Amino acid sequence: MSLTRHEIREKAFQALFALNANPDADENQLFQQLLNPEETDAVEIPAYLSTLVTGVREHQVELDAQIQPYLSQKWSLDRLAKTDLIILRIAFFELQFVDDVPTKVAVNEAIELTKAFSDDRSRKFVSGVLGKVVKNQAN
């Protein structure tokens, strides 16, 4: 099974969402369920899937601290929809820790994730936050 990076990001989002609800879940078992729902033979877990999920989890406090300043004063991380927060964490992780993902790609992929897993308001919100990040990086 060969997945595109876009598909891997979708699986990473699903894994992180599930792990947010159940932090003690076994990552490898979760990956197998996401990659092979028919539960046939175990499939190889794409390295980038592990990189994203493990990286976001290991750097979550740091990523959240980076996201917070881009929120308006009346918003805190606790008020964000979990889908939006997880998508932002993935994007911020890629922007900071994955050298071979250009900024434009990380932003576009985050917006695509909101289209797949959230609603139009979330898409606009995530786009706005990441737009501020890009503008800040350019300065």
Image: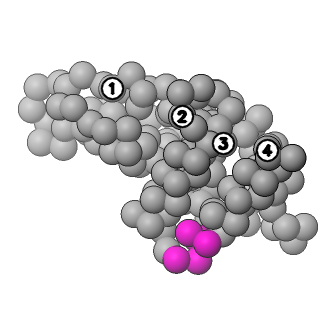
Q: Check if residue 121 falls in the magenta segment.
A: yes
Q: Position of residue 61 (x, y in %)?
A: 75, 37
**Residue drawn at the location 80% of the way across and 46% of the way down:** 138
Residue 94: assigned label: none
135 displayed left or right of 13: right
Of badges 4 and 3, the one in the foreground is: 4
Residue located farthest toward the right when viewing the structure as drawn = 73
**Residue drawn at the location 20% of the way across and 25% of the way down:** 43
Q: Is residue 111 visible?
A: yes
Instruction: Please report whichever mark, 4 or 2, sits nearer to the chain's N-terminal start.
Output: 2
Badge 2 marks a residue whose secondary structure is: loop
Badge 3 marks a residue whose secondary structure is: helix
> Circle 2 sits on which residue?
101
What distance separates the C-alpha of mark 1 from that of mark 4?
30 Å
Q: Quadrant of the N terminus?
A: top left
> Circle 4 sits on which residue?
137
Q: Which stretch did the figure color magenta?
A: 120-124
Badge 4 marks a residue whose secondary structure is: helix
